[in-house]
């Protein structure tokens, strides 16, 4: 059996304003009705797979758990990285955890944010790679190139291996356009997908040989794991001491056991808005990919994505326009790689648009900041059935809650009351309070905050079912 190891720790900054630090692209629905993480898991050939192991950032743990739950994935392991240390350590932690009980499964290492449109071809490539992996090879999947792409690393194929794959002659960094064209014409180079299949023990053996410092740090990090709700926490101090390196640099470029299986399955790393335009299957007759309420006049070869409002575009070619509740991006389709510069400026200026959307998801539901001004803020709060916000208090703000639909169980001090549609309650500054949805349907309410300081850090949690009390 194969254990899928899903790497879900990226930030996806090149897909701002949809993708943000608190809600990166792997947790977004960009290419289907499911999120990219959900698509990564549901495309796997289920008959040969163990429950997946997900490696993600601690800040995204509840997003990951909820998205697995909604597609009915049970018994998955969610391993929390206390800090990012690139792919080699993340995979090492997964391999060590997978072999703790004496097992030695094949690990299928996948990024959580890639698109693969041809699922049967993908399953066939996995089956071919399995033969090589069982023989002790470290298999990487090389994508059959469809264009002279200078945004991907490449793998040069060497001698054939058992009529299944090829030895890896070399890994090549992202080339310039002219070199990429020679790679395409020569038919010996493949795009580096960042996907792998190998025995857990073989990867650990090669890592220990070629990068013992990573091996030792990861071994220390998993020596004192802690179970926390649905999550596995590794030792923070030990993992922080681990060198940061990719699996390519740490192992694959050094090992004598690397080989490659070609994959031609409609793959894209969805690394930019232009790649989403390229992979969009329902462009209009003028080459436009449109999502949402769009009205065009004289527009060609463009990507327009509207989240909430009507977008009307006139007389433009090769543009990307993306609208969210709190930001709009307008860019030349051939310049979208420069979005990272905008994101860096947002981060440097401590703008909230770097990290959060206007609508913020929490383990109990979500809140949407629909209006704000001097000394007030208005939020729409949605609480899932059976969920409860932390027992908390605020030093600087009072709150009014008005129930729009559902039933609210409200605790203020020592008193608890039930509120239904059109009823309201007032929470004074400094009052200890909690909100719960005891019903079977979602609780929707409007919260009006008033006071001298309305930041999210003015929350003193006294008790919390999600382990967020410091």
Image (cartoon, rainbow, N blue to C red):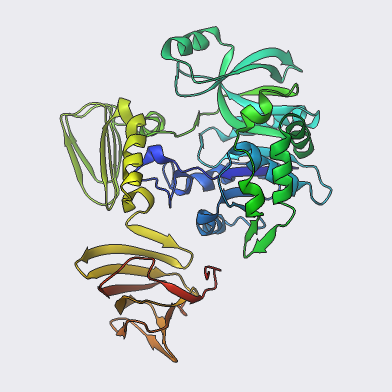
Above or below, 237 against 166 in this view is below
Dividing the picture into quarters, in which one does residue 229 lie? Answer: bottom right
Residue at image point 54% right, 7% down: 186
Q: Is residue 128 visible?
A: no
Apparent side of residue 453 relative to residue 198 in the rendered image (left or right): left
Residue at image point 70% right, 17% down: 167
Dividing the picture into quarters, in which one does residue 262 lie? Answer: top right
Indicate the position of residue 172 as horizontal and vertical percent values. Answer: 56, 18
Indicate the position of residue 284 as horizontal and vertical percent values. Answer: 29, 31
Residue at image point 44% right, 77% down: 392
Residue at image point 48% right, 16% down: 175
Residue lying farthest right? 102
Indicate the position of residue 217 as horizontal and vertical percent values. Answer: 70, 44
Q: Is residue 29 visible?
A: yes
Apparent side of residue 266 relative to residue 235 in the rendered image (left or right): left
Above or below, 151 against 91 in this view is above
* Quadrant of image for the N terminus: top right
Foreground of the two, 452 or 301: 452
Foreground of the two, 55 or 384: 55
Tally the marks: 0
Indicate the position of residue 142 as horizontal and vertical percent values. Answer: 60, 23
Above or below, 216 against 384 in this view is above
Apparent side of residue 184 relative to residue 7 in the rendered image (left or right): left
Foreground of the two, 413 or 295: 413
């Amino acid at each position: 059996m194969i254990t899928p190891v899903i790497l879900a720790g990226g930030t996806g900054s090149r897909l701002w304003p949809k993708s943000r630090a608190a809600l990166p692209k792997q947790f977004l629905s960009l290419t289907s009705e499911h999120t990219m993480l959900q698509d990564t898991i549901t495309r796997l050939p289920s008959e040969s797979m163990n429950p997946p192991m997900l490696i993600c950032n601690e800040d995204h743990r509840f997003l990951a758990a909820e998205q697995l739950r909604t597609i009915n994935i049970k018994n998955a392991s969610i391993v929390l990285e206390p800090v990012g240390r690139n792919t080699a350590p993340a995979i090492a932690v997964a391999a060590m955890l997978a072999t703790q009980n004496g097992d030695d499964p094949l690990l299928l290492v996948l990024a959580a944010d890639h698109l693969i449109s041809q699922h049967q071809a993908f399953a066939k490539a996995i089956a071919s790679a399995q033969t090589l992996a069982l023989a002790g090879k470290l298999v990487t999947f090389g994508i059959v190139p469809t264009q002279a792409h200078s945004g991907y690393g490449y793998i040069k194929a060497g001698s054939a291996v058992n009529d299944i794959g090829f030895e890896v002659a070399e890994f090549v960094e992202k080339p310039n356009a002219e070199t990429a064209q020679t790679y395409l014409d020569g038919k010996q180079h493949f795009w580096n997908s960042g996907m792998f299949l190998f025995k857990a023990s073989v990867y650990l053996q090669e890592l220990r040989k070629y990068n013992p410092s990573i091996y030792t740090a990861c071994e220390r990090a998993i020596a004192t794991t802690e179970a926390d709700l649905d999550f596995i926490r590794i030792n923070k101090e030990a993992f922080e001491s681990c060198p940061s390196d990719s699996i390519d640099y740490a192992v694959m470029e050094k090992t004598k056991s690397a080989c490659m299986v070609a994959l031609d399955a409609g793959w894209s790393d969805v690394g930019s808005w232009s790649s989403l335009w390229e992979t969009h299957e329902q462009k209009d007759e003028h080459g436009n990919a449109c999502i949402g309420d769009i009205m065009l006049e004289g527009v060609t070869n463009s990507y327009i994505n509207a989240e909430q409002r009507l977008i009307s575009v006139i007389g433009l070619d090769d543009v990307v326009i993306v609208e969210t509740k709190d930001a709009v991006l307008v860019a030349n389709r051939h310049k979208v790689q420069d979005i990272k510069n905008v994101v860096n400026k947002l981060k440097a200026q401590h703008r909230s648009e770097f990290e959060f959307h206007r609508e913020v998801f929490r383990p109990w539901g979500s809140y949407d900041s629909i209006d704000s001004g001097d000394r007030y803020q208005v939020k729409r709060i949605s609480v899932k059935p059976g969920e409860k916000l932390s027992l908390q208090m605020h030093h600087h703000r009072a709150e009014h809650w008005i129930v729009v639909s559902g039933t609210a169980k409200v605790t203020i001090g020592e008193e608890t009351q039930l509120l239904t549609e059109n009823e309201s309650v007032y929470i004074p500054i400094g009052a200890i309070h909690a909100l719960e949805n005891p019903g079977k349907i979602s609780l929707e309410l409007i919260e009006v905050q008033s006071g001298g300081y309305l930041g999210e850090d003015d929350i003193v949690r006294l008790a919390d079912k999600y382990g967020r009390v410091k």
